[in-house]
């Protein structure tokens, strides 16, 4: 099974997880980068990122190469923003034909909202369910030994 991990990460937690999953599964990685980067300032990131998420924006992405047809499985990775997906994922999903793919996703969050974000993601994809879901709490900035097992379980669910 050939797997592509498509992710967006503002501050590294999602990227860190994407790399761990890629290593565990032998998957390829595609990092989405908006043309206009979201700010990382303590307040500005919540103002601009939060507004963009609540407005369900589709920010323009920097050019990337993705031959989705070459993959059996797509794993989406995103930080939870205002209880929904980070907007760059929406731009990607709307520009791709992902019919027939196995789709899974993982979310990084500080506290809560991933469940709602997965519902939004499924709506965006037109799916009733994902092959596997994983939620981690700020895995890079707040390392937790339990995360490794959660990642292994997520990868095993996808391979099974
Ligand atoms: C605009 C914005 C909105 C956020 N909204 C939520 C939220 O609704 N729930 C939550 O638990 N964390 C929220 N967070 C925190 C991030 O989801 C969390 O820190 C995540 O691990 C960051 O991933 P990253 O380092 O890959 O960007 C928000 C962060 C930002 C910047």
Image (cartoon, rainbow, N blue to C red):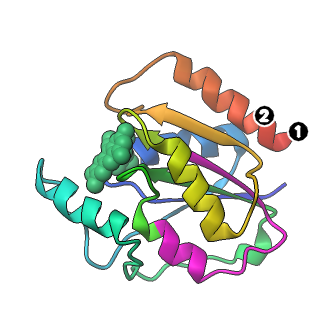
Residue 106 placement (x, y as % from top left): 57, 45
Mark yes or no: residue 16 visible.
no
Return the residue at label 2. 156
| Secondary element type, mark 2 | helix
Residues rendered magenta in the picture:
89-107
| Residue at the right extreme of this rendering | 160
- Quadrant where the C terminus sits is top right
The structure residue drawn at horizontal position 49% and vertical position 77%, both measured from the top left corner, is: 91
The structure residue drawn at horizontal position 58% and vertical position 83%, both measured from the top left corner, is: 95
| Secondary element type, mark 1 | loop
- Quadrant where the N terminus sits is bottom right
Nearer to me, 109 or 24: 109
Residue 122 placement (x, y as % from top left): 65, 60
| Residue at the top extreme of this rendering | 145
Report the disc number at residue 160.
Answer: 1
**Residue 105 is a magenta residue:** yes
Q: On the rendered structure, is 43 left or right of 116?
A: left
Q: CA distance from mark 2 to mark 1?
A: 6 Å
């Amino acid at each position: 099974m050939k797997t592509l991990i498509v992710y967006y990460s503002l501050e590294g937690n999602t990227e860190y997880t994407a790399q761990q999953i890629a290593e565990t599964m032998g998957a390829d990685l595609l990092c989405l980068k908006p043309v206009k980067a979201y700010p990382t300032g303590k307040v500005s990131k919540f103002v601009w990122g939060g507004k963009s998420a609540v407005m369900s924006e589709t920010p323009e992405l920097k050019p990337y190469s993705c031959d989705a047809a070459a993959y059996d499985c797509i794993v989406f990775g995103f930080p939870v923003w205002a209880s929904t997906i980070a907007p760059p994922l929406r731009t990607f999903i709307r520009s791709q034909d992902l019919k027939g793919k196995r789709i899974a996703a993982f979310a990084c969050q500080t506290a809560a909202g991933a469940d709602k974000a997965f519902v939004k993601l499924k709506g965006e994809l037109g799916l009733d369910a994902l092959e596997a879901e994983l939620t981690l709490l700020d895995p890079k900035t707040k390392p937790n030994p339990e995360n490794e097992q959660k990642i292994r379980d997520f990868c095993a669910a996808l391979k099974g």
